Amino acid sequence: MAKIPMQNCKNCNTPVADTARYCDQCGQATELKSFGIWNATHSFFDQYIALEGTAWRTLRKLVTEPGELSITYMEGQRASFVGPIRLFFSTSFVFILLMSLMLENSLALKTYYSDLLFSGQETVVFELLQSAFVILVTLTLSYAALVWLVKAIHHINFGNALLISLHFHSFSMLLILLASLLFWFTSGAGQAAAEWFVVAVLTVYMAIMLWRVIQYSSKQHSVVKIVLVLGIMALYLFFYVGFMRGFVEGFFSRGI
């Protein structure tokens, strides 16, 4: 048998075949070109298009197929999608940034929350926004714990429960951002409708997501699965309302 010509990767020094275009270990190209404007520009757009394709593929699956992104990840299909932690932190950053800008500049929001904005207490809302990331992380971990603690769900460890939670809260932040746009153009009934829209969509999304994940990972009877879905949703919503109410009341009790 003829010996295959080999070379070492310039990045990690792993032996690779001369005919290989990329290193199997680190993924770096085996044929390196000298730095130049054209090469650098070409490389940038190649990486940007690849990242953009992955991002859009991830968002499309996250939004249109509740629970399927989590199932796909658990099945091992990961290279084609943005990782759950990166997705969560990216959406969190965009969420907090855009919500801060909206709250600062939108007259509709200032009118809607006029009961909070008095006697110089505008800073209360902005400080609440600065604490939004802590709230998001707490709710995400709590939701994961609820899924994990339901012992009847077989084959779901805490890592997978956290994965489901990261995907759910990434979607919820995108939905809230979309609904917040209505505040720029509506007032009164329109703003109330936006809130109910968020509640309705999140409820349906959570139900479908939990059902698909439980259907994928559990061999229990369908009635048991329905009870599990409703139980997790009820516990989470109860915790969510209690946590948010306690947080806001505690914040204002400081005399701000």
Image (tube, grey):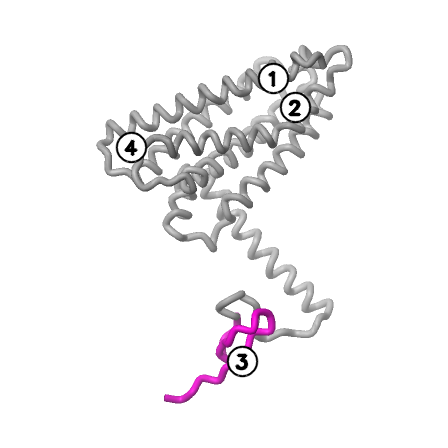
Residue 144 lies left or right of residue 136; in this view the side is: left
- Whole-angstrom CA distance, mark 3 to mark 2, is 57 Å
Badge 4: few (under 14), some or many (20 or more) residues near its Cα, within 10 Å?
Answer: some
Residue 188 position by quadrant = top right
As for residue 17 lying within the magenta part, the answer is: yes
> What residue span does the magenta drawing correspond to?
1-22
Give residue 174's position: percent from left, percent from top: 55, 34
- Residue that mark 3 sits on: 7
The image quarter containing residue 98 is top right
| Nearer to me, 234 or 212 | 234
- Find numbered disc 1 in the image and state the secondary structure of the residue it sits on: helix
Three-letter code for the amino acid on which mark 2 is drawn: Leu
Q: Amino acid at mark 1?
A: Val
Which residue ends up furthest to the left in the rendered image? 221
The residue under the point 68% across, 21% down is 125
Q: Secondary structure at mark 4?
A: loop
- Indicate which disc, 2 or 1, sits on the residue closer to the N terminus: 2
Provide the residue designation for mark 1: 248
How many angstroms separate mark 2 from mark 1 (CA)?
8 Å
Three-letter amino acid code at the position of disc 4: Ala
- Mark earlier in primary sequence (1, 4): 4
